[in-house]
């Protein structure tokens, strides 16, 4: 089977990245679809019948090498490199040593102490087996990010359109609440959710699960979602949080994901304004930190940005009410494969790299009362310019009856 030029070029880029990491190679391993990153990087066709362990080793220099089972020996023929075949477990272990060819340090989808669980895919038994070949295994987290989280120019252009629609839909949803309440018509969280879905579907956008509208104490639950059976009414004097996300319905469509808040009244009470201003300060300082660090051409890690936002909220005395990471990678999946802004739930040491996108969304959640989160989407272009894609960012809680 002839190898596509695009794949040859991709392997060359991967080899350059491997060398920049200072390691000998990247061992991609999959068993029955257990490693989506490996299948994605190897571009295994969706129709391929993959029921046996398969390996693809990309050295920093030289030709890649494949190891496949005899009954599925053609599965990786679309990739460049020499092929070795195994039948039984003894021959697998013997061939695995030859595949690595005296490499000392290799990357796999593994994370020491499960520090970055999103890429800790390879099972412990396989890690043990590979280590028996007298190699050191390091995490492929940075390599995965380079080849799974980077946006193309087309993705960025299309995402700007999606972001504008999402922001417009957000404003329409809050206006819908205002109209319903002013007219003394019943409106619930579920009604707002359905309104948003209708707007997004009108643009033929898709999403992994329905958008969220939370009122009062429900907003203090970051992952609350109303349903047809379980929802709360929205009345004058209520606080409302809306979180929505969408992407274009195509293979390489990438998400926009934003959160805004509003108050059903003609002026916003101080208790909401106070908390919003703290969250906004955390959001903006995190953004400025990324912007300045990128401009200075310094390294900025996901955990570093989380520290900046978290410190703001802690300094105001609300640290224990900020119960999630500051942000997540955005791409073809809403929570994608790049660096997350996290030094709480996990310690994400991955560097934020150009041509990737992520949210900044600090929050304060007061149980039984209300929660406030302000979420923006950020993109770093190839020249390290940092921008808000779904902007402008919210600057105050919206007064919905004004």
Image: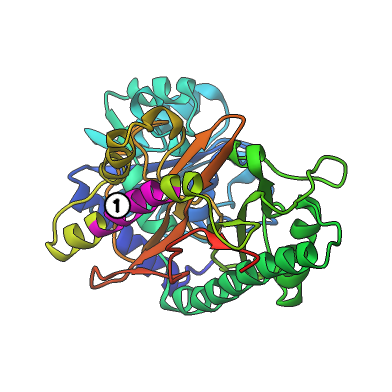
Q: Is residue 280 magenta?
A: yes
Residue 81: name its quadrant: bottom left
Residue at image x 21%, y 47%? 21
**Residue 296: x percent and y percent?**
12, 62
**Residue 335: x percent and y percent?**
52, 49
Residue at image x 80%, y 43%? 231
Q: Compare residues 101 and 166 and report the one nearer the observer.
A: 166
Q: Compare residues 1 and 30 and report the one nearer the observer.
A: 30
Residue at image x 40%, y 61%? 357
Q: Left or right of 137: which side holds 216? A: right
Where the N terminus falls, by quadrant? bottom right
Q: Main secondary structure of the magenta part?
A: helix
Q: Compare residues 293 and 184 and report the one nearer the observer.
A: 184
Q: Is residue 333 magenta?
A: no
Residue 262: name its quadrant: bottom right
Where the C terminus falls, by quadrant? bottom right
Residue at image mark 1: 286
Span colored in magenta: 276-288
Q: Is residue 339 visible?
A: no
**Residue 350: x percent and y percent?**
30, 44
């Amino acid at each position: 089977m002839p190898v596509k030029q695009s794949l040859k070029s991709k392997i060359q880029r991967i080899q350059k990245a491997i060398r920049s990491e200072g390691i000998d190679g990247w061992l991609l391993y999959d068993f029955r679809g257990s490693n989506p990153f490996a299948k994605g990087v190897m571009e295994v066709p969706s129709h391929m019948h993959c029921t046996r362990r398969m390996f693809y080793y990309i050295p920093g220099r030289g030709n890649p090498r494949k190891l496949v089972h005899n009954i599925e020996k053609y599965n990786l023929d679309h990739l460049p490199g020499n092929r070795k075949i195994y039948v039984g477990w003894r021959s697998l272990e013997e061939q695995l040593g030859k595949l690595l060819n005296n490499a000392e340090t290799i990357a796999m989808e593994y994370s020491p102490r499960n520090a970055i669980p999103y890429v800790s895919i390879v099972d412990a038994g396989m890690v043990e087996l590979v280590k028996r070949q007298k190699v050191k295994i390091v995490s492929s987290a940075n390599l995965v990010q380079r080849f799974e989280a980077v946006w193309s120019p087309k993705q960025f252009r299309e995402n700007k359109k999606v972001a504008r629609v999402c922001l417009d839909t957000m404003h329409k949803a809050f206006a819908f609440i205002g109209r319903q309440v002013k007219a003394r018509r019943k409106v619930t969280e579920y009604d707002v959710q359905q309104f948003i879905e209708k707007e997004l579907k009108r643009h033929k956008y898709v999403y992994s699960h329905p958008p969220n509208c939370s009122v009062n104490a429900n907003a203090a639950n970051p992952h609350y979602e109303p349903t047809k059976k379980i929802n709360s009414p929205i009345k004058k004097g209520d606080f409302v949080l809306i979180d929505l996300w969408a992407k274009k319905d195509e293979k390489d469509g990438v998400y926009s994901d934003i959160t805004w808040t509003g108050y059903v009244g003609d002026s916003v009470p101080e208790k909401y304004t106070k908390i919003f201003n703290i969250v906004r300060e955390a959001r903006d300082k995190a953004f400025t930190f990324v912007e300045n660090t990128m401009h200075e051409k310094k390294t900025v890690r996901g955990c570093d940005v989380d520290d900046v936002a978290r410190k703001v909220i802690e300094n105001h005395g609300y640290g224990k009410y900020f119960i999630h990471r500051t942000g997540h990678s955005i791409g073809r999946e809403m929570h994608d494969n790049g660096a997350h802004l996290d030094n709480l739930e996990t310690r994400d040491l991955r560097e934020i790299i150009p041509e990737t996108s992520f949210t900044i969304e600090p929050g304060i959640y007061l149980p039984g009362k209300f929660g406030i989160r302000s979420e923006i989407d950020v993109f770093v272009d190839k020249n390290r310019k940092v921008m808000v894609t779904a902007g402008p960012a919210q600057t105050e809680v919206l007064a919905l009856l004004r």
